[in-house]
């Protein structure tokens, strides 16, 4: 079929027809989301995946060309699955390389355990991987830092958190460290670029829907998800640059990008002094933040 012959078919698919396609295909988003959720930790948000899937469905209806002969539900299925994978990658703090190295390390350790009848030593594991023991330790550290714990997904048996965690009252040192961490967290949020701060305060503190934030900032929900992931990485590194500098990797990227990160780290420290951070012992003020005016880009 020539392009001229296909054009009338594409034009014949009116806006009303595309809306009808979306409405008819809405159950596909639910089916695919359920399939993904069944294989993910319980702290992964179903709402986030559903939002990404719905956005992909609408975008699929706009890009769909019936002249290809591919049924819309099959075309939309592919687009939705891709969008959900992108959403999960956006939420992942670890790079693909770190995940891949961690999986390979686990496979090698399992193979050596089966062969030796015991857990292999670090030297044996490093030799099997073809790396130095230092590189092995770095891989383990990357894998540990990639783990994000959620209290919602802490127990698989439905037991109370109190059954697994000690209930003793924290001592003075622990309380002091906790209050300082909270102070640094608030400083790190305050030092974020304005639009990232709107996303963090809106999504995590005010619990506003992603769709509402996307409308306010005049971007897509996918972009809001990317901004959220970017902000989380900045917050983590901004806090660690003052609390645990050894956990902040070497800054990479362009000279301008490195300078922006260094400026952000410095701004986090300049937001408050030790006395002020200790005074910020709760999120009472942040639990109901005032609306933040954002200048929209042209």
Image (cartoon, helix red, strand yellow):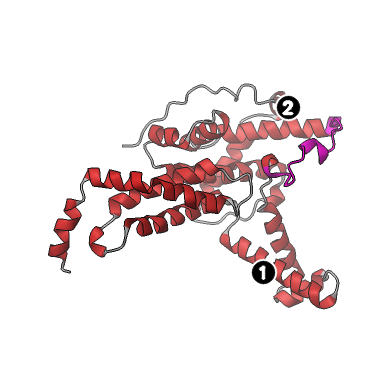
Would you say residue 264 is visible in this rendering? yes
Per the model, the C-alpha gap separating discs 2 and 1 is 43 Å
Query: Residue 295 location, x and y as percent?
Result: 38, 30
Camera-side residue of 75 and 99: 75
Tell me if 184 is positioned left or right of 211 in this view: right
Residue 104: mark = 1
**Quick one: quadrant of the N terminus?**
bottom left
Tell me if 34 is positioned left or right of 7 in this view: right
Query: Residue 247 location, x and y as percent?
Result: 69, 51
**Quick one: quadrant of the C terminus?**
top left
Would you say residue 270 is visible in this rendering? no
**What is the span of residues highlighted in magenta in the rendered image?**
153-173
- Residue occupying image coordinates x 58% and y 36%: 267
Q: Is residue 173 above or below residue 8?
A: above
| Disc nearest the viewer among 2 and 1 | 1
Camera-side residue of 7 and 91: 7
Q: Examine the residues drawn in magenta and state their main secondary structure.
A: loop
Marks 2 and 1, the one that precedes in the sequence? 1
For disc 1, the neighbor class at 10 Å (few under 14, some 14 to 19, many from 20) is few
Image-quadrant location for residue 178: top right
- Residue occupying image coordinates x 16% and y 65%: 3
Callout 2: helix, strand or loop?
A: helix
On the image, numbered disc 2 is attached to which residue?
Answer: 278
Image-quadrant location for residue 141: bottom right
Query: Residue 240 location, x and y as percent?
Result: 67, 44
Residue 177 belongs to the span the image colors magenta: no
- Residue occupying image coordinates x 32% and y 56%: 72
Callout 1: helix, strand or loop?
A: helix
Query: Residue 215 location, x and y as percent?
Result: 38, 34
């Amino acid at each position: 079929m020539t392009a001229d012959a296909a054009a009338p078919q594409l034009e014949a698919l009116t806006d009303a027809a595309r809306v009808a396609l979306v409405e008819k295909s809405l159950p596909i988003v639910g089916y695919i989301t359920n399939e993904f959720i069944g294989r993910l930790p319980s702290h992964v948000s179903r709402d986030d995946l559903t939002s990404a899937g719905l956005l992909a469905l609408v975008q699929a209806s706009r890009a769909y060309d019936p002249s290809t002969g591919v049924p819309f539900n099959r075309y939309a299925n592919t687009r939705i699955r891709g969008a959900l994978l992108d959403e999960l990658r956006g939420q992942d703090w670890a790079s693909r390389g770190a995940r891949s190295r961690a999986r390979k390390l686990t496979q090698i350790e399992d193979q050596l355990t089966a062969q030796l009848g015991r857990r292999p030593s670090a030297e044996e594991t490093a030799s099997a991987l073809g790396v130095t023991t230092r590189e092995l330790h770095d891989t383990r550290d990357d894998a540990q830092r990639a783990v994000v714990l959620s209290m919602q997904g802490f127990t698989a048996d439905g037991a109370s958190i109190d059954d697994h965690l000690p209930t003793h009252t924290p001592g003075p040192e622990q309380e002091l460290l906790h209050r300082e961490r909270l102070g640094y967290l608030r400083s790190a949020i305050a030092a974020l670029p304005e639009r990232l701060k709107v996303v963090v305060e809106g999504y995590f503190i005010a619990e506003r829907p992603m769709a509402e934030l996307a409308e306010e900032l005049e971007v897509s929900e996918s972009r809001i998800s990317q901004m959220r992931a970017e902000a989380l990485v900045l917050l983590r590194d901004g806090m660690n640059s003052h609390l645990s500098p050894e956990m902040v990797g070497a800054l990479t990227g362009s000279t301008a990008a490195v300078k922006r990160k260094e400026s952000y780290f410095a701004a986090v420290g300049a937001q408050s002094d030790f006395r002020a951070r200790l005074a910020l012992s709760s999120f009472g003020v942040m639990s109901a933040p005032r609306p933040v005016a954002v200048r929209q880009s042209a």
